[in-house]
Image (tube, rainbow, N blue to C red):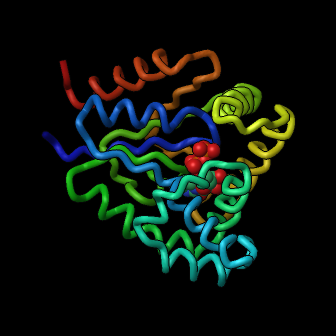
Amino acid sequence: MSRWIIAIDGPAAAGKGTLARRLAAYLRLPYLDTGLLYRAVGRRVLDRDESPTDAAAAECAALALQPEDMERTDLRDPAADAAASAVADVRGVRAALLDFQRRFGAERGAVLDGRDIGTVIFPNADLKLFVTASPEARAHRRWLELRGRGLGADLLDVERDIRARDARDIARTASPLVPAADAIPIDTTTLDADAAFAVALRAARSRFGLE
Ligand code: CDP
């Protein structure tokens, strides 16, 4: 099997994770959800009663990150969303996580999803997808997901949080969220998971010459 690197970037709750997981399984490649790294760093900072916007505290947490931090069950609640978004703004945090991401991909190839995979982590990735959807569609999906996990939330609050995270991802100077020039855009506003996967698979087949 080839050691392809597939970069899937895009804003919050655009469906990157579902798409990346399915593509990785189909192509038999390892999968890394890089958002979990930032979430785990954010959680470490919160555990110490420090502020995720404190750059020194965030960098220290990133340098101390352990594999078991990624197994925590509290990485996907709204407090972790906000903490991840804040620590992701810290240049030292991004630098501390860079090597791990590159090493993960270098071993056997990988599908990685995040915000800066195709621009910074693997600028020479074999295939780059940039997955978007309208903020309303993304908020609705995240709201359904939270409800499914028994975490009641107000739809408008979810949309406000998503817009705030997007704004921070786009505005930061360290690795801002921006499509790589050679990324294939996929707008999932009106696509369900199967339809989005079909589009991504078509792109992968054409790029890698698969049947
Ligand atoms: O699942 P969702 O799209 O809501 O977020 P995520 O991908 O788990 O990422 C959580 C936060 O980490 C985001 O709000 C980003 O600010 C940050 N992040 C990043 O800056 N760079 C990445 N490669 C991945 C996530």
- Measured as percent of width and height from the top left, residue 146 is found at 69, 36
Is residue 177 among what the camera can see? no
Comparing 189 with 177, the one in front is 189
Quadrant of res 85: bottom right
Using residue 59 as the reference point, say whether residue 31 is left or right of it.
left
Using residue 157 as the reference point, say whether residue 2 is left or right of it.
left
Residue drawn at x 59%, y 73% as measured from the top left: 91
Is residue 133 among what the camera can see? yes
- Single out the residue that lies furthest toward the left: 1
- Measured as percent of width and height from the top left, residue 50 is found at 73, 78
Residue drawn at x 42%, y 22% as measured from the top left: 197
Residue drawn at x 18%, y 18% as measured from the top left: 211
Residue drawn at x 38%, y 30% as measured from the top left: 22
Quadrant of res 14: top right
- Single out the residue that lies furthest toward the front: 150
Screen quadrant of the N terminus = top left
Comparing 154 with 123, the one in front is 154
Comparing 143 with 91, the one in front is 143
